[in-house]
Amino acid sequence: MTARWHILGVGAIGGLFACRLQSGGADVTLLSRDCEEASRELVLKHTISERFHFPQQTITSNQDPIEHLLVCTKAWAVESAIKAVAPRLSATSVVVLLCNGMGLAEAVAPVIGEAQLVVGSTTSGCRRSSEGELIVSGDGSTQLGMLDSSPAPTWLSAWRQGVPEFEWETGIRSVLLGKVALNAVINPLTALHGVTNGNLMQPPLQAITEDVIKEVQSLLCSADAGEIASALPTQVRAVCNSTAANHSSMRVDMESGRRTEIDAIVGWLLSSLIPHPPATPILSELYDAVKEREPEVLDA
Ligand code: KPL
C-alpha cells in the first residue's frame, strides 16, 4: 500500500525530502501556513534538474487524518507548527522530526497525544536559489530512530527507496548528539563570519574552527560521550568538504534577518547537556554574538 506523507516546513530540507519521498513511491502532500494554492511544483537540481508536483493544503483548511507527518520546520517553530495539526493526529499516526537541535522531542511529546514519535538527523546539503529552486550540494546521510531504541517499523519503504544513504538507527540519541555538536561548530562560525561551510577548513578560520571543536569535545567528554567527541573533527571536516559551497542554515537565517536555531543548538549544549559544564569561552562568546544579532521582534 502506498504510504501517505504530509510535510510540515517546506524549506530547503523539507522540500528536498518531499521530492525524495515521492521518488521513493510515497503519496506526498505539502502543508503550508498561508498559501492558498491547491498544488505546488518544486524544482530539484542535483546532477540533473527534475520537477516534482505535489498537492498542497493550508495547515488549518483540511481536517483529514494524517498518517505520517514529516516535520522540517525551524527548531523554534516545531511545537507551534505541530500544535496546529495536532487535531489531525491519532494513535496510529507517525510524527517524524527532522530538525536541527536538541530538546525538541521532549517539547513535542505532550502535543502529539498517542501518535508515535520518531526523530532523525540528516547531513544532506540543500539550499534554495533566488528563483526558489532546490539546489542539492551533497546527498549526505540520513538516520531515523526512536528514543526508546525500537527496531525498524514497517513504513520505511519510501525512505529506503528515495533517500540516499538512509538507515534506521536504534541508537538515534547518539546520532542527534553528534549532529548537534557538528552544527554547534559549523553554524555560528559560518553565520558570524558570512562564509561558506568549506571556508571553515581553510585559513584564516581553520584555527578558530579547531578551537571550537575542542570546546565542544570537552562538553561531550564531560557528558560521557567520548566516542562522539573523538569522531567530531573527522565529521566536521567531512561535512564542510561535502557541503563546501553551502551557506549553513544559520548563515541563511541571520542574513535574512530571521531568528536562528542557536538556542536549540549551542544553547542546548551549554545549558542542558550536563548540569555543570566545563568552561567553553569561545563557544559562549559565539552564542552571545549570535543572540545579539537576532531580530528583536521574532517572526513565528
Ligand atoms: O545542518 C547543516 C545546517 O546548515 O544547518 C549543515 C550540515 C551544517 C549543512 O549546512
Image (tube, grey):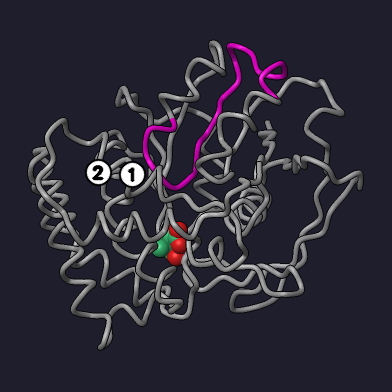
The x and y percentages for residue 200 are: 31, 78
- Give the position of the N terminus as an image quadrant: top right
Residue closer to the observer: 220 or 47: 220
- Which amino acid does the dot numbered 1 rest on? Gly
Q: What secondary structure is marked by label 1?
A: helix
- The quarter of the rendered structure image containing the C terminus is top right
Is 74 colored magenta in this rendering? Answer: no
Instruction: Find ligand 1 in the image and state its quadrant.
Output: bottom left
Q: CA distance from mark 1 to mark 2?
A: 5 Å
Front residue (pair 298, 270):
298
Amino acid type at mark 2? Leu
Judge from the rendering whether residue 218 lies leftward or rightward of residue 70; answer left or right.
left
The label on residue 14 is: none
Place of residue 119 in the rendered image (x, y in percent of width and height, measured from the top left): 43, 35
State left or right for residue 65 relative to residue 89.
Answer: right
User: Does the residue at mark 1 contact the one at mark 2 (Cβ under 8 Å)?
Assistant: yes
Comparing 295 with 174, the one in front is 295
Q: Position of residue 164 (x, y in %)?
A: 47, 58
Magenta stretch, residue numbers: 85-104
Residue receiving disc 2: 270
Is residue 165 something that shows in the picture? Answer: no
Disc 1 packing (10 Å; few <14; some 14–19; many ≥20): many
Residue at the far right in the pictured view:
37
Q: Residue at x 41, y 70 (%)?
A: 192
Judging by the rendered image, the residue that carries numbered circle 1 is 267
Q: Residue at x 31, y 37 (%)?
A: 172
Where residue 19 appears, x then y in whole percent? 66, 55
**In-image side of 164 versus 93 (left or right):** left
